[in-house]
Each structure stands twice: as C-alpha cells, then as structure tokens.
Image: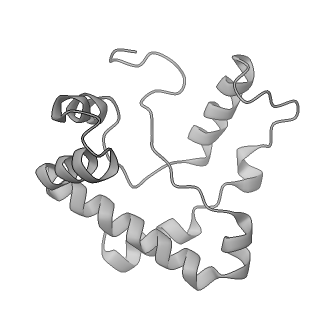
Amino acid sequence: MLKPYDTPLGEPVRVLVMTEKLYREKPAVAQKVLECFVDSTRAFIQDPKAAQKYVVEQMFKGQITGQDFQDAIANSPYSYDVTVDHIQITTDLMVKYGVGKMTAPPRAADWVKLDLLQKAKAKLGVK
C-alpha cells in the first residue's frame, strides 16, 4: 500500500496486546508493562537513530537493513495511541477478507481496554 491510505483503516497502528488474565489478576504488572511501552515508545520517537539501531541490530539481528527499517517506519510511525474504533475497523476488514477465519468476531468495545495506557501516559507526562 502506498500513502495516502484510502481504506477505512487509514494508517496502520502497531498495538500492544496483553491477556485478560494478566490485566485482571496482576494489574500492577500489567500497568508496569504499559509504562515500559510508553517510555520506550517515547525514547524511540525522541531518538530515531537509537530506535533504528535497536530494531535492526537487536530485534532482527541484521536480517533487515536500515532502509528496510526506514520504509517500515514511514509506513507506520511510532504511536502511543489506538482507538476502539480503529480496532473495530480492523476486525471488520479481517472478517471481510477472511483473515483469521472468525465466525463470530467480538465487538472491539467489549474487549479493548485503554485505561492502563491512559494511566501510563499520564504518569509519564505523555500527551
């Protein structure tokens, strides 16, 4: 896909997913995970060279190039935010195109929880 994205999904968003069990049974751990996510995302946004070095060298162990990384980031830049609507649109498109073979897809409003993300952003002073 090339920009501009002319689908209802718009620009792709990377998401962090955690289990309901972690969210429900170990809320302090779940909150800490979201704080680490927000803090590391902020660090990558503030220092793109460090982000590229980490992703290319540590995550992918040199299997992608710096240009590959730049292309990916241009396609889907770092973000702290996702919305319930965005997840619903993603689910609807997955159903439409047969991705995941969901016979009864859940409504995003029933399972997407953004409260820990909002708390982490507030604690770390991220807008």
The residue at 15%/49% (across/down) is: 48
Image side of residue 64 versus residue 94, left or right: left
In this rendering, the answer to whether 71 lies above or below 77 is above
Q: Position of residue 68 (x, y in %)?
A: 24, 29
Instruction: Decide if residue 95 is in sight here.
Output: yes
Q: Position of residue 72 (x, y in %)?
A: 30, 32
Give coordinates of residue 52: x percent, y percent. Answer: 19, 46
Closer to us: 81 or 97: 97
**Residue extending furthest toward the right:** 103
Q: Is residue 127 visible?
A: no
Q: Where the N terminus falls, by quadrant? A: top left
Colour pattern of the rendering: one colour
In screen coordinates, is 79 left or right of 88?
left
Q: Along the line of sight, which residue is nearer the eye, 49 or 104?
A: 49
Is 60 situated above or below 47?
above
- All told, the count of numbered labels is 0
Q: Quadrant of residue 125?
A: bottom left
Residue visible at 28% across and 36% down in the picture: 73
**Could you tell me which residue is drawn at 35 percent across and 35 percent down?**
76
| Residue 49 versus residue 5 in the image, above or below | below
Image quadrant containing the C terminus: bottom left
Q: Quadrant of residue 54?
A: bottom left
Point 30% across, 40% down: residue? 77
Q: Residue furthest bottom?
A: 28
Say if 10 sits above or below 126 in the image: above
Residue 53 at x, y = what percent? 17, 50
